[in-house]
């Protein structure tokens, strides 16, 4: 579907927002109409996406007033803005080259790159690469067809480290490479080759990712003992009309599978002497990252992620004798959140900046490299460091984002800060209310800041990066027409969870023809998987997962319960070996609190739906909480964590595979079903093994349970796509509204 250039006028839309109805043909037509009108939540200037020009204090963005797009150049030093180029001239030049009329008010340049002096533009358009001389003459050159994007391996494929390019020594005199599983060095001048190892085999080979020491005297790499790989097979039933099915095979490690083992090794290039360490400190590998050389050639550093994720170490191996010692050790009785770890070894070689959740929140620490212990904590408090944007070593300052610092707002709102290495001088660089997305100038003198809430339109401003003061306003979204058309802003609702005191934050979506005198069933959209936070915080006019469903006569809600991230370590740890919990006790308490405040919510008719982890959790809801949830739509669920990907499940359920996997399994608990359930799966789901859904179906059949199963041919990981979405509408209309859905042939999808 194409993005709208502008919203239709309020008068034209008003006719779709007058009559109250639930689950009727009119409701369906309105839901589909709004889905197309507000595709991608389109609002002018909602997402200007500033792009700084390297080496300057200038950036460009697309100013969009809802009818005219203008590439705009901002000079931060001069506080000025102007057109980046002559839109009419470029449109005319492009039109002549491609023999097709281009509207200068709607030019869309892909992969745009702007030169230092803004006098040259390079971009892709209509499948070709172009160069435009950005002056009065405006010469335009076609540089040929855009090359196809690179094809990357599937994200579940483990890199065997056999395809690395030959590594050239710092002085260019030698090249190191792997041949027949062994290490070789070639002299560039003579072409003479020297074999450094002879013990490399298919079952224990040397990695081709080779790193030279800074002085060029040694090389470091890993010796790898591979493990047998698991594969999942998928049948593509309908590749094309009249074509035979295709069998696909995908590498896919699952919980409990054996994993490869890596040992860092150092070799003296001249003598061939090998330094191979003892493996005691990295003996139970989930993975090992590195090695990387110290700047003084004294050794290499690598990171060890222990199987089960309770220990994580940064280790240093001495070039003198192969001794291995910890530089940083991170341990937890449940799991270390290794994907959030930040490490930065300072250029002085004496200090390391490290992030950790050891005090119940994610914070930054300064480590003394000599002792392997923290010298001090840089950030501290009941809030969460999110992303390290930049480490300014000369200025001894860190730029980062965080949530929860301000106590007077949604604790999930992201703001940007700077802080000195010693922990002093923490400064809020984005002080306006809302959640922020900041882009800093290359030298970190300025930042372009876009902020909003789910109900407040985005504003973009230029700020001084030393103190966060606003320099100039860049753009402001206008949602007047949206409101006049009957748009109902989602409501942020907060209520205590299961413990009666910890606030849970969620959103409530109402239909555009909302009438508080009526009763509305409640449908919850769930994605409660640990590792992130999921309730939207920034502005979106049309939530494709929630808005349309509300139009059928529901109030649709979403909430982050215990077991999700970025509140505290304790808050998230509820999920550990307890995915069956799914935060549902918090969700139920929150929905009940909403029902107490809003009597038009019918809590005797509550449904739930989700995909992936949300697919597992929606099914879990009706299996374990049928007294509250009366119907569930479950798409592509990881219903049995033994069937799902290794990295997700061993993080939260641990290793080895134990009873916690069984306890969380919807296959094992299928016999508990007493409410309507629709299972949906894409036959080519390469994220969650489709067998996970089919095994639930098998268990339900064996337990003589009634349910619905929708298999989508040719579809990958999904909430349902257009067919499944329509099935979801009908499912809840039938089971929560008690209405027979309209005939599909009568609905206007245009």
Image (cartoon, grey):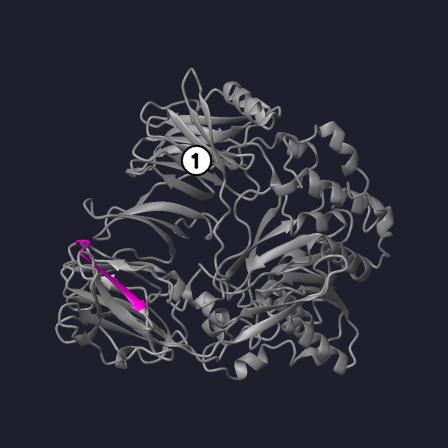
Find residue 138 and report its horizontal and vertical position in percent.
44, 19
Find residue 447 and report its horizontal and vertical position in percent.
36, 37
The residues colored magenta run 171-178
- The residue at the point 75 percent across, 29 percent down is 12
Q: Is residue 364 left or right of residue 503?
A: left
Number of numbered markers: 1
| Residue nearest the observer in this picture, 286 or 500 | 286
Q: Quadrant of residue 50?
A: top left
- The residue at the point 77 percent across, 42 percent down is 30
Q: Quadrant of residue 217?
A: bottom left
Q: Is residue 110 visible?
A: no
- The residue at the point 24 percent across, 52 percent down is 423
Q: Main secondary structure of the magenta part?
A: strand
Residue reaching furthest top?
136
Q: Is residue 311 magenta?
A: no
The residue wearing badge 1 is 50
Q: Is residue 574 left or right of residue 392?
A: right
Pick the quarter of the image with the C terminus: top right
Find residue 615 and report its horizontal and vertical position in percent.
63, 65
Find residue 637 and report its horizontal and vertical position in percent.
63, 67
Q: Is residue 399 above or below residue 231?
A: above
Q: Is residue 387 visible?
A: yes
Helix, strand, or loop for circle 1? loop
| Residue nearest the observer in this picture, 101 or 417 | 101
Q: Is residue 419 above or below residue 728?
A: above
Q: Residues within 10 Å of mark 1 (few under 14, many from 20)?
A: many
Q: Is residue 177 magenta?
A: yes
């Amino acid at each position: 579907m194409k993005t709208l250039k502008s919203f239709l006028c309020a008068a034209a839309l008003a006719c779709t927002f007058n009559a109250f109805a639930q689950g009727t043909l009119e409701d369906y037509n309105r839901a589909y109409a709004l889905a197309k009108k507000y595709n991608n939540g389109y609002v002018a200037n909602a997402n200007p996406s500033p792009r700084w020009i390297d080496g300057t204090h200038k950036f460009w963005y697309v100013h969009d007033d809802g009818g005219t797009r203008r590439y705009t150049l901002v000079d931060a030093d001069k506080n000025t803005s102007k057109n980046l180029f002559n839109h009419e001239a470029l449109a005319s030049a492009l039109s002549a080259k491609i023999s097709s009329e281009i509207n200068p008010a709607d030019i869309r340049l892909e992969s745009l790159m702007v030169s230092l002096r803004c006098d040259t533009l390079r971009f892709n358009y209509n499948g070709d690469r172009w160069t435009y001389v950005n002056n009065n003459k405006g010469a335009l050159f076609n540089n040929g067809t855009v090359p196809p994007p690179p094809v990357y391996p599937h994200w579940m494929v483990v890199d065997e480290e056999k395809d690395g390019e030959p590594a050239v020594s710092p002085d260019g005199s030698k090249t190191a490479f792997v041949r027949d599983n062994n290490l070789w060095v070639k002299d560039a001048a003579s072409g003479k080759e020297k074999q450094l190892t002879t013990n490399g085999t298919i079952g224990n080979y040397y990695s081709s990712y080779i790193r030279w020491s800074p002085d060029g005297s040694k090389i470091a790499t890993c010796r790898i003992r591979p493990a047998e790989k698991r594969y999942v097979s998928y049948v593509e039933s309908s590749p094309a009309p009249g074509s035979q099915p295709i069998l696909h095979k995908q590498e896919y490690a699952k919980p409990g599978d054996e994993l490869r083992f890596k040992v860092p090794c150092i070799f003296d290039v001249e003598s061939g002497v090998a330094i191979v360490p003892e493996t005691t400190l990295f003996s139970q590998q989930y993975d090992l990252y590195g090695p990387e050389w110290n700047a003084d050639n004294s050794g290499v550093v690598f990171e060890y992620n222990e199987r089960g994720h309770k220990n994580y170490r940064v280790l240093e191996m001495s070039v003198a004798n192969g001794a291995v010692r910890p530089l940083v050790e991170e341990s937890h009785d449940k799991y270390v959140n290794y994907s959030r770890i930040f490490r930065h070894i300072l250029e002085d070689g004496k200090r390391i900046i490290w992030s950790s959740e050891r005090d119940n929140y994610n914070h930054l620490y300064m480590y003394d490299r000599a002792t392997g212990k923290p010298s001090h904590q840089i950030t501290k408090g009941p809030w969460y460091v999110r992303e390290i944007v930049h480490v300014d070593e000369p200025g001894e300052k860190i730029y980062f984002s965080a949530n929860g610092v301000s106590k007077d707002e949604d604790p999930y709102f992201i703001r940007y800060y700077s802080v000195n290495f010693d922990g002093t001088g923490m400064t809020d660089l984005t002080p306006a209310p809302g959640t922020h997305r900041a882009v800093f100038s290359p030298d970190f003198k300025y930042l372009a800041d876009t902020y909003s809430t789910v109900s407040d339109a985005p504003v973009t401003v230029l700020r001084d990066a030393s103190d966060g003061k606003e320099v100039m306003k860049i753009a402001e979204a206008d949602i007047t027409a949206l409101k006049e058309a009957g748009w109902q802003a989602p409501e942020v609702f907060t209520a205590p969870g299961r413990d009666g005191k910890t606030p849970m934050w969620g959103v409530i979506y109402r239909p555009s023809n909302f009438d508080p005198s009526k009763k509305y069933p409640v449908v919850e959209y769930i994605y409660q998987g640990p590792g992130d936070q999921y309730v939207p915080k920034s502005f979106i006019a049309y939530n494709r997962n929630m808005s349309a469903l509300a139009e059928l006569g529901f109030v649709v809600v979403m909430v982050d319960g215990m077991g999700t991230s970025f509140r505290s370590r304790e808050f998230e740890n509820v999920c550990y070996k307890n995915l069956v919990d799914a935060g549902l006790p918090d969700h139920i308490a929150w929905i009940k609190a909403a029902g107490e405040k809003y009597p038009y919510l019918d809590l005797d008719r509550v449904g739930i739906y989700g995909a992936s982890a949300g697919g597992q959790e929606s099914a879990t809801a009706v299996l374990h909480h049928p007294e509250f949830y009366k119907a569930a739509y479950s798409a592509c669920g990881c219903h049995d964590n033994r069937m799902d990907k290794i990295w997700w499940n061993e993080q939260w359920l641990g290793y080895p595979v134990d009873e916690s996997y069984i306890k969380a399994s919807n296959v094992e608990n299928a016999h508990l079903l007493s409410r309507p359930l629709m299972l949906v799966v894409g036959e080519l789901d390469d994220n969650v093994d489709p067998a996970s859904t089919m095994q639930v179906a098998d268990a339900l059949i064996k337990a003589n349970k009634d349910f619905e199963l929708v298999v989508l041919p040719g579809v990958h990981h999904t909430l349902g796509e257009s067919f499944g979405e329509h099935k979801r509408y009908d499912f809840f209309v039938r089971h929560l509204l008690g209405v027979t859905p309209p005939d599909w042939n009568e609905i206007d999808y245009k």
